[in-house]
Structure formats: C-alpha cells, structure tokens
Amino acid sequence: MKTKAAVLHAKHEPWDVTELDLDRPGANEVLVRWVASGMCQSDEHMRHGDVRPRFPIIGGHEGAGIVEEIGHGVTRVKVGDQVISSFIPACGHCRWCATGHSNICDLGASVQTGSLPGGRFVFHKDGEDYGALGTVATFSQIATVSEYSLVPFTHQVPLEVAAIVACGVPTGWGSAVYAADTHPGDTIVVFGIGGIGINAVQGAAYAGAKNVIAVDPLENKREAARALGATHVASNSQEALELAMSLTRGVGADKSLITVDLIRGRLVNEALATVRKGGTLVITTWADHDKDTIQISSIELTGMERRIQGSLYGSGNPNYDILHMLDLYEAGALKLDELITAHYTLDQVEQGYQDLADGKNIRGVILHDT
C-alpha cells in the first residue's frame, strides 16, 4: 500500500511530507486509517535533538481513527472500530501491566527505535526502513500498528477531539491526580501551561485542590488556565512562590508540577522552593539525554523531607485512563473542545509547529484527508 506521511530525516531538518510504502498487518497487528492527529511538542523534540530517535521517523503519537484491517490473532479490536493511539504499547501481562503500571510496559522499549513491538518496520521507501514515532505514526494517513497500541472506544466523541486524549490529556491529568496524588484542599502549582500543563490544571481542580496556581509567561496561556480550573495565575517562578506562600500562610504548596516543554535545572530549584515540608515536586518533562538537568542541595530533600517524582504518561494505565477521560468529557467534568486552538492539513505541519513555538496553540490538530 501507499500512504502519505510527515517524516523527519535528521536532527534540525524540516518535516518532509512524502509518499511511503506500507506493509499490511501481520500477527497481532492492525491497519488504521488515522482521521486526526494531535500536534504534541514531543514530536518537535526529535527535530531539536532533545529526544534521539532512529531516523528517518514518521511523526505523530496522538491520533484517532478507524480500523480497516486486522492481522492474525488480533483480539482487542475489530474492523470498523474507532480507536485512539497509545504511544506506550500495553501488553497486559508483563510485570508492570499486571501490577497496574502499564504506562511503563516492557513493550515500550520499541518506542525509541520506531519499530513495532518485536522489531518489525512496516514503512519503507527506496529500500530504507522508516520508523514510527511511539510505534503509531499518526502523521501518516494510514498505518500498520500493534493491537497493543490501540484503545477502542464507543463514546459519541468527534475523532478530532478523541485524538488529543491519546497523550496530552491523560499525561497532564494523571500527573496531578496520580503522580502528585492531589487531595481535596491542596495547594497545587503547575509550571508551564501547554498541552500537558493545561490538563494538569484540570486534574488538580477535579481532585479538589483549593488553590491551583498556573505559571506561564504568556498571557493567553494564563487566561486559558483560568478558564479550565486555575484559581490563580503567575507569569514567573517568583510570583508563583509569593502566591504559594501567601495562600498557605507561609507553609508552601502541597505539590508542584513541572510541565514545561523542556526542563532546565534552574526551574527545578525554583519549583522545589514553592513546595512545603514533606511535599512533592512532580516532573513530567523531557530533556537532553546527555545533560544533567536536575541539580539540587540535599538539604532541600533531606532537611525538608521533600520528594521528587518523575511521571510518564501521567503515571496511569492508557487502556483505562483514555476511556476514563472520555467518560469525564461526556459528563461535562473535563473540557476538551477548548484545548484545540487550530486545525491543519498534513501539508501544514511546519506551520502548525511554528504556531506552537510562537505560543499561539495549546493543541493544534491535523485533519487527514478522508
């Protein structure tokens, strides 16, 4: 088969929208026609070298589409199903899946190489194998995907809305609800109001936080946070610290979350300063593999008994949490439509990421030709 896809060939090169050859599904594999794909900052991290995949690689890890064909042994989906991508495959039976941590399933090892679980490459051009970001390649019109990377759903939700529930929504929401373990009455600080941070705000508010402080230098991001649950906003770390202290009578925030696009060591220290004794700092952010991005005084941990908690995919379980997000949306408890600030065609992928870099978008969505 032929498909049109947006590809990165090397670091610092532009997105290339090109035609590729695609293999049909094999055992436990599924052919999906992607209808919509969210434009997440993580895809751009590949271009800037903050994440180092095997090139060439097809972008896109947030997506929603329709199953068109299934391979031998597939049991999780059937032809005609609506599905959402999970950029971490979940086998359901490894140690991590079996103990409720499918966000760190062993099959996730294939994410960096871009192969399907088991090592198979399904995209090709001129004899060269092309990888699939997150094993799902939602920047391709059609893709052969592992059944372990798909979550079928029957909710009455537009596919363009469902697409953004693949990554940013559960990652942000779970960072606040699961990783930070927000309790009713807590004071929560969220640093960075993008596609993840805005949903951390929603998660903290839903979990009952009394004060939710959203920190971002851009006024439009701060206003968006107010509309989705933030009780207070700040433009920088110093303002956030002053707010956290004044709202808690000098005690400090119960939990703070770092959800900026790229972590920097100084911000870790600034965010940790807002956290009370015995509180938690959650870090849900990528960084260059070769850089030591977290350097703090041991007094800040031992003397104050603070904790630093990393979070991947919201520390949740994609097969449950993606559907849970849709349940909350249908119940009116989670806002999704408001997160989509622009639509693009596949050929406009460069413009979409420029708009994101310029701070115009919380989440842009690519609508594929159908």
Image: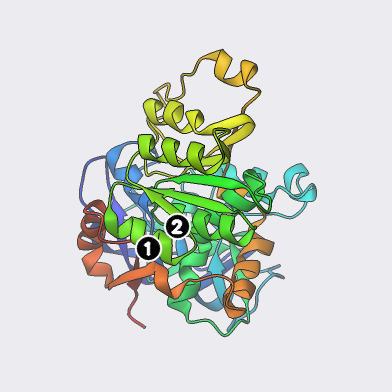
Say which mark, if any, is on residue 198: 2
- 266 up-or-down from 341: above or below: above
- Residue 225 makes an appearance in the image: yes
Determine the residue positioned at 24% across, 51% down.
357
Relative image position of residue 19 (x, y in whole percent): 28, 66
Relative image position of residue 69 (x, y in whole percent): 56, 77
Q: Are discs 1 and 2 less than 8 Å apart at CB?
A: yes
In this orientation, which residue lies closer to the viewer: 131 or 46? Answer: 46
Which element type, helix, strand or loop, lies under badge 2?
helix
Relative image position of residue 281 (x, y in whole percent): 56, 35
Foreground: disc 1 or disc 2: 1
**Residue under label 1:** 224
Determine the residue positioned at 37% across, 66% down.
140
Determine the residue positioned at 79% across, 49% down.
98
**Image quadrant containing the N terminus:** bottom left
Q: How many marks?
A: 2
Rounded to the nearest angstrom, the CA distance separating label 1 from label 2 is 8 Å
- 119 up-or-down from 198: above or below: above
Relative image position of residue 222 (x, y in whole percent): 35, 56
Disc 1 marks which amino acid? Ala
Q: Quadrant of residue 263?
A: top left
